[in-house]
Image (tube, coloured by chain):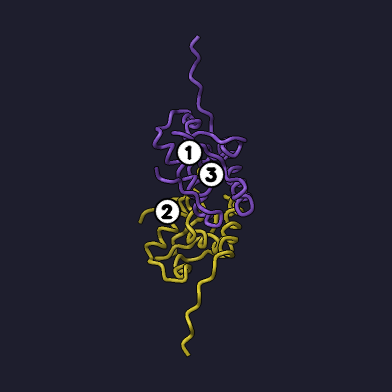
Chain colours: A yellow, B purple
Amino acid sequence: MRPLYHPHPDEITVQGILYALSDPVRVQIFSGLLASDCAKNCSTFIDITGESLPKSTLSQHFRILREAGLIRSERKGVELHNRARCEDLKERFETMIDGILAAYRSELGKRPRRKQPPRSS
Amino acid sequence: MRPLYHPHPDEITVQGILYALSDPVRVQIFSGLLASDCAKNCSTFIDITGESLPKSTLSQHFRILREAGLIRSERKGVELHNRARCEDLKERFETMIDGILAAYRSELGKRPRRKQPPRSS
């Protein structure tokens, strides 16, 4: 089984982080991991968009977050357990990442909500 | 001649800005426009990387910055005159953009400098 690639803290780049966070689904996954005290399986996030994501799409999102240095993944059996790399990001990137997440939250708050389908009674 | 597309301020997205700024050359162009009081031609930036960029590459960088809502371009004869859209970005994006530019500056500061070629005397 191929080892998982994690960049050394010195190899994490602004460019890589911006690319990884330029996708709203990856931002939601990363925010979920930041807010969590414990490591989370990829499959925890399968319904994150409100619709079930294909497993391959989800895996690719996790790979991009991992290779940008935003998360660390460990194999446990057939699952990957993922955490945000808070300590490695803190000194150089915390202000930028906080700014990005705040801008996304403000954008989501402004977006008109989807109409709920009428309940069948 | 095709009109230049500029998104309305309400259509500018975090995602679009992050994608546009995930390239260091575009960041240098955008920083140059932010720091300038007057509009600048694309060709001003042709040597921005230290080597002459192909005109088509430069045009594409300006198009991506423009379509993300970061700059406004106006045709003057055969040239485009470009400015940063400071007013349109201020309220929603200023903190995030400042964080990104600061992180890039800090990264550039850390990068080992290229050796200067020996002077011919």
Identify the subunit bearing mark 2: A
Give x and y (percent) for residue A66.
Answer: 47, 54
Residue A35's x, y, as percent?
59, 63
Label 1: state its secondary structure.
strand
Residues at discs 1 and 2 both on one chain? no
**What's the amino acid at mark 2?**
Leu
Dot 3 amino acid type: Ile
Asked where in the image residue B30 lies, by quadrant, the reply is top right
Q: Are marks 3 and 1 in contact (CB under 8 Å)?
A: no
Residue at mark 1 to residue at mark 2: CA–CA distance: 49 Å
- The chain holding disc 1 is B
Q: Which element type, helix, strand or loop, lies under badge 2?
A: loop
A30 to the left or right of A55: right
Crowd band around label 1 with a 10 angstrom C-alpha radius: few (<14), some (14–19), many (20+): few
Name the residue located 42 percent from the left edge and 63 percent from the top edge: A58
Which dot marks residue B71? 3
Please tell me the numbered disc located at residue A80. Answer: none
Residue carrying label 1? B75
Image point (50%, 27%), residue name: B114
Q: Secondary structure at mark 3?
A: strand
Q: Nearer the viewer, residue B81 or B12?
A: B81
Identify residue type, mark 1.
Arg
